[in-house]
Image (cartoon, grey):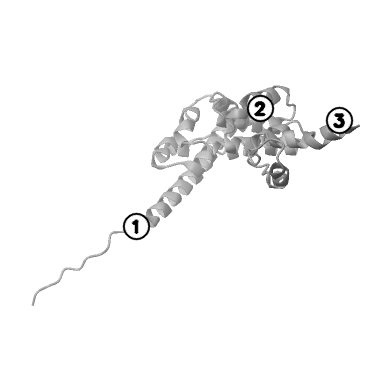
């Protein structure tokens, strides 16, 4: 009976020492006291456990949090859950997490999902890639279905720069459904953002020449 009580008492402590909040001595009272301060949004081990939740919304949120943290230490765990995941939205979130963890080929799947009911979800992820240039190779693919091209243009509208304006210029004359409109809107949004950035740059102080009488 005594041994059972000890096991029940110490079991949560063993779990807590795996978190970042409890890096002190094992079986320490301080670690117990800090149990309420563990932030599940940054605890990659705790987030990875949530991938096994019965609620797909919880699984998707966990995958997106792991993606935000680029939690490379949980990549094998995420790959395992990706293989068995049945929910398509959660699977897409896991693909995004894997891409953020260094699996560059997962970007192809994200682009592919633009031609699906998960279009907006894919756009939200592609709008967070490190550079708009990563999407140019997909934009130039002549075999793209219109929803894919539109989704890429929507993503580029949020992260594009001056070079992007040149990349999307040919699509402003496209006859495919929705493509020309998306290209026009992307151009407008990028130009507006660049103009705002220019306005934020510090201007040189104005000098006035003194004239002698």
Q: CA distance from mark 1 to mark 2?
A: 45 Å
* Nearest to N terminus: mark 2 or mark 3: 3
119 vs 70, nearest the viewer:
70
In the rendered structure, the answer to whether residue 149 lies left or right of residue 35 reads: left
Badge count: 3
Residues 83 and 44: in front is 44
Q: Earlier in the sequence, mark 1 or mark 3?
A: 3
Between the C-alphas of marks 2 and 3, the distance is 36 Å
Q: Nearer the viewer, residue 53 or 149?
A: 53
Where does the C terminus fall, quadrant-wise?
bottom left
Decide: marks 1, 3 in contact (CB < 8 A)? no
Q: Residue furthest bottom?
A: 213
| Residue behind mark 1 | 202
Q: Secondary structure at mark 3?
A: helix
Where's residue 156, x and y in %?
50, 39
Helix, strand or loop under label 1: loop
| Residue named by callout 2 | 78
Horizontal side of residue 50 vs 185, given as left or right: right
Q: Nearer the viewer, mark 1 or mark 3?
A: 3
**Residue at the disc numbered 3:** 3
- Identified at 60% across, 35% down, the residue is 67
Q: For residue 13, which quarter of the picture?
A: top right
Whether residue 180 can be seen here: no
- Which of the 4 image quadrants contains residue 128? top right
């Amino acid at each position: 009976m005594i041994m059972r009580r000890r096991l029940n008492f110490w079991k949560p402590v063993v779990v807590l020492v795996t978190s970042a909040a409890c890096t002190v001595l094992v079986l320490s009272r301080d670690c117990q006291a800090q149990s309420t301060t563990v932030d599940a949004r940054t605890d990659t081990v705790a987030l990875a456990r949530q991938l096994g939740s019965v609620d797909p919304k919880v699984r998707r949120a966990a995958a997106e949090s792991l993606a935000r943290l680029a939690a490379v230490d949980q990549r094998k765990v995420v790959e395992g859950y990706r293989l068995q995941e049945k929910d398509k939205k959660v699977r897409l979130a896991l693909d995004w997490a894997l891409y953020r963890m260094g699996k560059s080929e997962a970007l192809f799947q994200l682009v592919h999902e633009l031609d699906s009911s998960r279009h907006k979800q894919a756009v939200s992820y592609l709008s967070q890639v490190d550079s708009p240039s990563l999407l140019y190779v997909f934009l130039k693919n002549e075999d793209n279905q219109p929803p894919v091209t539109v989704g890429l243009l929507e993503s580029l509208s949020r992260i594009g720069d001056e070079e992007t304006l040149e990349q999307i210029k040919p699509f402003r004359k496209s006859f495919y459904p929705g493509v020309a409109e998306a290209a026009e809107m992307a151009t407008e949004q990028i130009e507006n953002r660049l103009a705002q950035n220019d306005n934020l740059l510090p201007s040189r102080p104005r000098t006035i020449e003194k004239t002698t009488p």
